[in-house]
Amino acid sequence: MFAKILIANRGEIAVRIIRACKEMGIATVAVFSEADREALHVSLADESICIGPPPVKDSYLNMTAILSAAVATGAQAIHPGYGLLSENARFAQLCEQCHITFIGPPAQIISKMGDKDEARRTMVAAGVPVVPGCDLVPDAQTALREAKRIGFPLLIKARAGGGGRGIRLVEREEEVENAFLAASSEAASAFGDGACYMEKFLRPVKHIEMQVIADQQGNVVCLGERECSVQRKNQKLIEESPSPVVDEKTRRQMIDVSTKAAKAVGYQGVGTIEFLYDREGNFYFMEMNTRLQVEHPVTEMVTGIDLVKWQIRVAAGQPLGFSQEDIRLEGCAIECRINAENPSQGFRPSCGRVSLLHIPGGPWVRFDTALYQDYFVPPYYDSMIGKLIVHAKTREEAIRKMQAALCELVIEGLDHNAEFQMDVLEDEEFRNGTYTTNLMEKRGWV
């Protein structure tokens, strides 16, 4: 097992990883930007090193500075958390060259699955159902020809990156050229890769993801599904496990397919297979995230398995301590992302000093955050400032528990979306579980 781990991230996920390391008896190193000098993860870690000015490109994406910090402190491994460098194949490769363990899959797997076009072709070869579409299109003329074959509506999607960038919905033939050029340009600017492919746009659909974990001995276990269909501009807002519409037979099929997909690429570590799920109960591979997900706590709540600890253990070469037969989804868990933004003003981002903070408590209520009273939330980073997670025996109880927790949550000094989350929980389609990824648009909440 590692004696010391450097956490190459910030905010709530850095705090989450440090807590897991402390419970495992592992020393920790925090890296931070000048804007995060007073951040919670900095004070919780055993050591901390400033790696640059506030912009992420100069600090949390500065591979040289992070690796130098790891070497200087004698860290044996680097945990990238999610976002930032977590799916950067080059960084994983540099870690290997520096004889530092990257807590995630090998660089070649990250590269293979990060290329969404190659991932799609890999899944087809493995017998995993995929959305009808085409491989990479080199130019607008080819895109138009393929679009006519696929049929409308369709999506033009960048093969690299994520977070909803490099994606364009095309409803009609005359929109293809401009949409292709816009998606390609956005992807080239955001990810340094403008290559795009296309696939049929299915609607209405649910977004269901399957959590997998694989060790270095070839064992793969799927920890069930998460429903992530409450989204705004392709960014998730509420997640739950299990899904209210996936029955046991379908769950077993999705588990089998997800396990097959992970084995097909020789996967190692924690990862997520994402599917689109239609009203007929059909599911189609969308992409694979080769990292820990923001919403991993709901899986932890229903399975009782600490994903961060097991992520560290398998990276250290330990075999999984459980099999597929051991996995049982008990009860229901719901997560609400608490973002520093003002929903009534077009979800305008907010920053400022936390003048009053009260975190809800009670049995099976969890708030993952890096906030503390008098902390200044800087304007440079992602707007998510916490994740409120609850667990109960039934979905109805879990919804009521989440409503109570949101009512109890107090964060003064900046705008946030807790009241808006209450509105979503009250929505009829959310309550009966029939909601799909277009819920926000249907309600005019975008």
Image (cartoon, grey):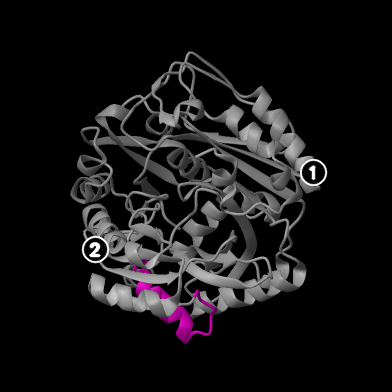
The chief SS type of the magenta part is: helix
> Which one is nearer the viewer's eye here, 238 or 390?
238
The tag earlier along the polypeptide, 1 or 2, is: 2
* Residue hosting label 2: 194
Which secondary structure lies at badge 1?
A: helix
> Which one is nearer the viewer's eye here, 216 or 146?
146
Q: Which residues are magenta?
A: 114-131
Q: Quadrant of residue 258?
A: bottom right
Name the residue: 45% across, 74% down.
151
> Which one is nearer the viewer's eye here, 426 or 335?
426
Residue 213 falls inside the magenta stretch: no
Note whether 260 is above or below 378 in the view shown: below
Q: Amino acid at mark 1?
A: Glu
Q: Amino acid at mark 2?
A: Gly
Total marks placed: 2
User: Between tags 1 and 2, which lies in front?
Assistant: 2
Residue 430 picture location, percent across and down:
69, 46
* Residue hosting label 1: 396
Note whether 23 is above or below 217 in the view shown: above
Note whether 194 is above or below 411 in the view shown: below
The N terminus lies in quadrant? bottom left
Name the residue: 65% across, 63% down.
224
Residue 219 picture location, percent across and down:
56, 75
Residue 118 falls inside the magenta stretch: yes
Kindly give the residue lying farthest to the top in the view shown: 355
394 lies left or right of 174:
right
Is residue 71 at least partly visible in the picture?
A: yes
Residue 377 picture location, percent across and down:
39, 25
Query: Is label 1 in contact with label 2 (beta carbons under 8 Å)?
Result: no
